[in-house]
Amino acid sequence: MTTFAGRETAAPTAASFIELDEQWSTHNYHPLPVVIAEAAGASVTDVEGRTYLDFLSGYSALNFGHRHPDLVAAAVEQLGRVTLTSRAFHHDQLGLFCRELAELTGTELVLPMNSGAEAVESAVKIARKWAHRVKGVPDGTAEIIVAGSNFHGRTTTIVSFSTDETARADFGPFTPGFVTVKYGDAAALRDAITPRTAAVLLEPVQGEAGVIVPPEGYFADVRAACDEHRVLLIADEIQSGLARTGTVLALDHEGVRADVYTLGKALGGGILPVSAVAGRRDVLGVLKPGEHGSTFGGNPLACAVGRAVVRLLNTGEFQQRATELGTHLHTRLNELVGRGLSEVRGRGLWAGIDIAPGGPSGRAASEALMARGVLCKETHERTLRVAPPLVITREELDRGIDAIAEVVRP
Ligand SMILES: *Cc1c(COP(=O)(O)O)cnc(C)c1O
């Protein structure tokens, strides 16, 4: 007998934990009814001892799988030294992390933050200051162009330019200074540029929107428009970056360089929140002491884990796995079009799959997959996002795809 929630019970069940969550945590998520207690690699185990394949990877925060030994070792080593200093003092991990991340991404200066939303907020502030102080846009009038169906996080400024009513309604008043154009339409974006435009903020692949890959040549056209009008290109690589699509940065597929990148999710190795803004020295260099900061941003533990993530990416192994397993994933998923799926999109080991009309809803499909030992989650009514950890084996991947095939079969 154990004491649980103040009562004497036998081993606690999944239902008892779900009841606790329901009672004590805000209801801003609608999770699947699984209660995870342990995880390793591409698998998780619930409190009742059932094992599942993780086909979501914490929205790509777990690109290297659960508890990758090199990442855990780096964290444990740093836990034995120093974990937090505040930025009031220097520490021996910050400069190394920033240099190694800059070298990996081909950038010149790094601003470490914690969550992805903070990285995006920071990039917005940097772009505005750059416009006002360097480009010569009158103070307080800088505009940033964003795309419809974007996802950049949940702060009040970021939801100000969301086109998702659920994310936005009731949270105003909103931050002005954002202009929305259709994703994938370079001509519309070019038309939206004014003398006040500071930056264009785009996801190289729109993850939350359903893994939307832009049309060929889109980013090259966007880059050209930005160059012509002295506008910064900010690529939000928080979900698309760090090997998910087969390259360090998803924008690498387009042969285009951004001026500023936001990184997050997998940068923390699935261990702790680590995000960063990385980009041109003359852009990030506009920030001066006192103008921006974060108590936890760039802490020694985060930097040590981030450095271990960069080391993994420097081997190229994960990019190669994403490419090879991704080809297999897309080949097999495309065979399901007309057999329960209406469309498959994506790049690397990352897919958005639309369930054909008449099939189960995304939620029902996720529940049916769970019953078959595969954890996946809908992003929209009829769309599932498939993003297994890059450490998954081909056999495990096939097992998950077999389950998807069964669940969507008409
Ligand atoms: C998840 C995500 C964010 C926000 O990251 P958080 O860590 O949840 O704040 C921002 N941009 C993109 C593209 C994302 O996928």
Image (cartoon, rainbow, N blue to C red):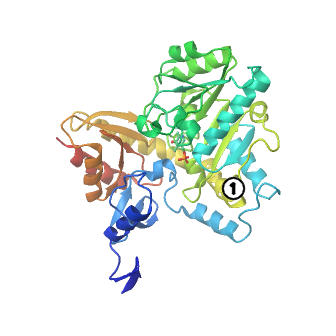
Q: Residue at x 37, y 38 (%)?
A: 352
Q: Residue at x 31, y 68 (%)?
A: 15
Residue 68: quadrant of the picture: bottom right
Residue 14 percent location from the top left of the image: 33, 69
Residue picked out by circle 1? 296
Side (left or right) of 99 relative to 305: right
Side (left or right) of 80 relative to 8: right
Compared with residue 153, is residue 303 higher up or lower down, i.e. above or below? below
Of all residues shown, which one is farthest toward the bottom?
A: 1
Residue 26 percent location from the top left of the image: 44, 56
Side (left or right) of 367 relative to 117: left
Asked whether 103 or 173 is in front, the reply is 173
Residue 48 percent location from the top left of the image: 33, 72
Q: Residue at x 75, y 37 (%)?
A: 108
Compared with residue 153, is residue 228 higher up or lower down, i.e. above or below? above
Q: Is mark 1 within 8 Å of ligand 1?
A: no
Residue 223: quadrant of the picture: top right
Asked whether 6 or 232 is in front, the reply is 6
Q: In the rendered image, which quarter contains the N terminus?
A: bottom left
Q: Is residue 32 visible?
A: yes
Side (left or right) of 283 relative to 165: right
Compared with residue 216, is residue 208 higher up or lower down, i.e. above or below? below
Compared with residue 324, is residue 215 higher up or lower down, i.e. above or below? above
Q: Amino acid at mark 1?
A: Phe
Q: In the rendered image, which quarter contains the C terminus?
A: top left
Q: Is residue 389 visible?
A: no
Residue 296 percent location from the top left of the image: 69, 56
